[in-house]
């Protein structure tokens, strides 16, 4: 999806004086009160609804919850660039997502065996590949044309009658992604979106789904959002109201399991960030 990377500047605090008593009071704040803003239940709820139930190129619309219900079988179609590197990036990233969500996943050697294709292609082939997957009529809609025009990479998926994801396609134009220094970003963001979090939003931060992010790895918030998406309390086809009603129990359980407090450490385990040594 389209993303413009901006570096945000943190305001500098002008400290004129600080009494010993004030310093002592700040140091005495309980750890539980020093939690990150994104760890609040209301922020997690709003963030999840934003990325799971809205669509980037359909402003104002609200869709039903969708996620994979069957094992994911991935086929890598490397038509351009370093096929070995592309395989490494894709395998590390998707195995990381599988570990986070618990969703079964394997890599296969042919298109016939796959329900998810990752195509590393030239930018000139983006429209043709998209049309071959969704059909010429869908590919010519204003939303699709905008996605192809503005985006660096593109994620497409189809759902079944139960609204679960039945198949998916990730298009990565290697030439253009390299020009924009976005190859790794494309693998990380598009794969996470294809798990069932398809919307980009600046209201979700810090996150790979935010256009103002200063990072290109999955954030602790992204880790928790993925955990929420594949929570047993949720299911494909749920409406926004149904999801909102179910989320308090989901968030409470994840908090009790330490998924919020330990997300910074847990999101790194088995990740591309760890693989890259960053």
Image (cartoon, rainbow, N blue to C red):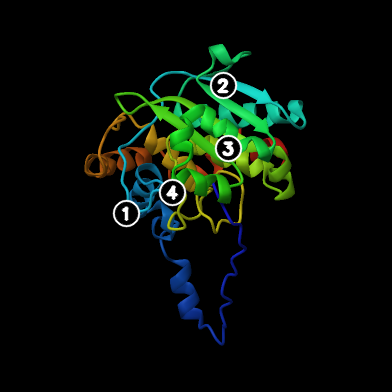
Tell me which label, 2 or 1, sits earlier in the chain. Answer: 1
Percent x, y of residue 226: 44, 37
Structural distance between the alpha carbons of marks 4 and 3: 16 Å
Badge number at residue 26: none
- Residue 31 visible, this angle: no
Eye-nearest disc, 4 or 3: 3
Q: Nearer the viewer, residue 155 or 132?
A: 132
Q: Which residue is mark 2?
A: 74
SS assignment at label 4: loop
Eye-nearest disc, 2 or 3: 3
Structural distance between the alpha carbons of marks 3 and 1: 39 Å
Percent x, y of residue 263: 49, 43
Relative placement, left or right, of 83 versus 208 is right
Tell me which label, 2 or 4, sits earlier in the chain. Answer: 4
Q: Which residue is mark 4?
A: 57
Relative placement, left or right, of 253 versus 90 is left
Percent x, y of residue 70: 41, 19
Near mark 1 (Cα within 10 A), the count class, few <14, some 14-19 or many ≥20, is some
Structural distance between the alpha carbons of marks 4 and 1: 25 Å
Structural distance between the alpha carbons of marks 2 and 1: 35 Å
Image point (30%, 30%), residue name = 235
Badge number at residue 42: 1
Eye-nearest disc, 3 or 1: 3
Most extreme residue toward the bottom is 16
Badge number at residue 127: 3
Tell me which label, 4 or 3, sits earlier in the chain. Answer: 4
Quadrant into which the C terminus falls: top right
Structural distance between the alpha carbons of marks 2 and 4: 26 Å
Tell me which label, 2 or 3, sits earlier in the chain. Answer: 2
Residue contact between numbered discs 3 and 1, judged by CB atoms under 8 Å: no
Image point (33%, 53%), residue name = 60
């Amino acid at each position: 999806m389209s993303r413009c990377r901006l570096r945000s500047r943190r305001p500098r605090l002008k400290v004129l004086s600080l009494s010993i008593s004030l310093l002592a009071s700040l140091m005495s704040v309980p750890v539980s009160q020093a939690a990150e803003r994104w760890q609040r239940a209301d922020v997690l709820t709003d963030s999840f609804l934003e990325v799971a139930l809205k669509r980037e190129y359909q402003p104002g619309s609200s869709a039903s919850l969708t996620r994979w219900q069957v094992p994911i079988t991935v086929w890598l179609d490397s038509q351009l660039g370093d096929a070995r590197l592309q395989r490494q990036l894709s395998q590390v990233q998707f195995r990381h997502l599988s570990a986070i969500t618990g969703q079964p996943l394997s890599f296969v050697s042919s298109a016939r065996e796959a329900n998810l294709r990752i195509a590393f292609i030239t930018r000139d082939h983006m429209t043709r590949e998209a049309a071959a997957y969704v059909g010429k009529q869908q590919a010519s809609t204003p939303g699709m044309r905008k996605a192809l025009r503005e985006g660096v990479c593109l994620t497409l998926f189809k759902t079944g009658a139960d609204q679960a994801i039945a198949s998916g396609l990730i298009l990565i134009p290697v030439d253009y992604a390299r020009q924009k220094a976005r190859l790794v970003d494309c693998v990380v963001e598009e794969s996470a979106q294809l798990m069932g979090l398809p919307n980009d939003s600046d209201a979700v931060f810090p996150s790979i789904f935010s256009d103002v992010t200063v990072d290109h790895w999955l954030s602790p918030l992204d880790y928790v959002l993925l955990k929420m998406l594949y929570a047993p309390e949720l299911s494909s086809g749920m409406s926004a109201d149904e999801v909102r009603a179910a989320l308090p129990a989901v968030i409470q359980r994840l908090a009790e399991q330490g998924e919020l407090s330990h997300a910074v450490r847990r999101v790194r385990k088995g990740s591309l960030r760890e693989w890259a040594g960053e």
